[in-house]
Amino acid sequence: MIRRLVLDVLKPHNPSVVELSEALSHLDGVEGVNVIIYEIDQQVENAKIVIAGSSIDFEGIKKKLEEMGATVHSVDEVAAGKRIVEEVRTPQDRSARM
Amino acid sequence: MKFLEKLRRYIRVSGIAPISRRYFIMNAFDGATTILGIVIGAYVAEITSELLVIWSGLGATLAMGLSGFVGAYMTEEAEREKKLRTLEKSMLTELTNSVVGRASRFASLWAGIVDGVSPAIAAVTCLAPLFLSSVGVFSTDFAIQLSVAIALSIMFLLGVFLGRISKRNIFFHGAKMFFVGLIITIVFLALKVL
């Protein structure tokens, strides 16, 4: 049971982010959507999409994105289960950075 | 998704609204001008049968409608196909079955319909007094005068519409379009006098 999904998506300028986020928010199991454009090219734009919900259907999300002309570049974060577990910093992360 | 909602989405995604507005004005103007020419020409030639004018007008309407539909559809389709292929190259994926591909196909068809139907609407409206005259509602002379007045009014209204779009003086734009129709009318009437 997926509760949060963070996707890196490539999309055309149209449909706009407004239409894309609305279309995703109407899917079953989705309670909230956040779309941020972080790069714009002449034909396409890259978006970071954060989806939160009680039971997110990943295949349904992917299908809707493809229907809107977008493609998933990567799945950057998934939170699943009864409660959302946030990313935690560990000593190993610190040593890895050093 | 409801049909109308789908149409609205395709219009938004394809950006066809301003293009179809241009097609509508251009071709409705063509329709009104053509019928004005036919009606005035018939008047100058002293044709007394409304049916002759009506059939000539309907023939021109059908030709304008068909040529408008085919011309606009094929032009839009070719341009949009090229745009879609370029976008597909950037996206590295096929978009034919996505909303982008469907909106692209819809836009070509929509442009064709607007381009084909707009001259027909203007032309049939201008011919309406002659239809009524043929069933005895008006005299032929009055029907011709009314038909010319309707054609000139349509031209004026199209100018007003353009003025509204460009947010400039609507009467000035209306008068500009009206003037074109007036020139045709005056030229033909002058020919009759000569």
Image (tube, coloured by chain):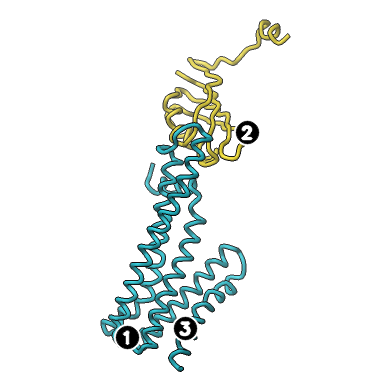
Chain colours: A yellow, B cyan
What chain does badge 2 belong to?
A: A
Question: Which of these two is toward me, B155 or B185?
Answer: B185
Q: Quadrant of residue B142?
A: bottom left
Which percent across, then down, holds residue A62?
45, 28
Q: Residues within 10 Å of mark 2 (few under 14, many from 20)?
A: few
What residue sits 55% from the left and 26% below the top? A8
Image quadrant where one finds the C terminus of chain A: top right
Give the number of the mark in front: 1 or 2. Answer: 2
Residue corresponding to mark 1: B138
Tell if the residue under mark 1 belongs to the same chain as the one under mark 2: no
Q: Amino acid at mark 2?
A: Glu
In the rendering, which numbered label is found on residue A39?
Answer: 2
What chain does badge 1 belong to?
A: B
Which percent across, then down, holds residue B32?
43, 73
Q: Amino acid at mark 1?
A: Phe
Q: Residues within 10 Å of mark 1 (few under 14, many from 20)?
A: some
User: Mark 3 and mark 1: span between their CA atoms?
Assistant: 21 Å
What chain does badge 3 belong to?
A: B
Which percent across, then down, holds residue B124?
36, 72
Question: Which of these two is toward me, B9 or B180?
Answer: B180
In the rendering, which numbered label is found on residue B185?
Answer: 3
Q: Amino acid at mark 3?
A: Thr
User: Mark 1 and mark 2: span between their CA atoms?
Assistant: 67 Å
